[in-house]
Image (cartoon, rainbow, N blue to C red):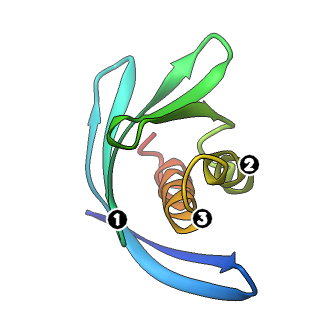
Amino acid sequence: MIVFHCREKIGRKFEQWDGYVKNIRNYGSHYEIMIESRSGFLCMIGNYVNGAFISIPAFGIGCDLSNYGDYFWNNEKLARLMNPVDAATIAEALRTLHKNNYI
């Protein structure tokens, strides 16, 4: 289990919460990542001709990503598709995994 800490300005105040990566599987062409926090997410990430992508099938969400360590760009892109707490959680999980050489 990989633990990470989130801190994000939501509205007019900063909120803080913890999350963790419960499971990560490398399929060679993509990763399947189970993220737990205030919500739970099964994400698939990978690379394609135009860069990186994320798919969260249970939420009906998919979009391009910057590199996995780019919290701000990834958070901004995800926050257009889901609530800001969930977007920040996923962006921080990706940054933590990238920083620690898991992805």
Horizontal side, residue 74 vs residue 61: left or right: right
- Residue 45 coordinates in the image, percent (x, y): 45, 32
**Vertical placement of 64 versus 4: above or below?**
above
Q: Nearer the viewer, mark 3 or mark 2?
A: 3
State the CA–CA distance, disc 3 to disc 1: 12 Å
Sequence order check, earlier mark of 3 and 2: 2
State the CA–CA distance, disc 3 to disc 2: 13 Å
Q: Nearer the viewer, mark 2 or mark 1?
A: 1
**Vertical placement of 79 versus 37: above or below?**
above
On residue 84, which mark appears? 3
* Label 3: how many Cα within 10 Å (few below 14, some 14–19, many 20+): some
* Label 2: how many Cα within 10 Å (few below 14, some 14–19, many 20+): some
- The residue located at (36%, 32%) in the rendering is 31
User: In the depicted view, which residue is nearer to us: 82 or 46?
Assistant: 82
- Residue 52 coordinates in the image, percent (x, y): 59, 27
* Residue under pointer 1: 39
Three-letter amino acid code at the position of disc 2? Trp
Sequence order check, earlier mark of 3 and 1: 1
* Residue under pointer 2: 73
Three-letter amino acid code at the position of disc 1? Ser
Horizontal side, residue 83 vs residue 14: left or right: left
Three-letter amino acid code at the position of disc 3? Pro
* Label 1: how many Cα within 10 Å (few below 14, some 14–19, many 20+): few
Helix, strand or loop status at disc 2:
helix
Helix, strand or loop status at disc 3:
helix
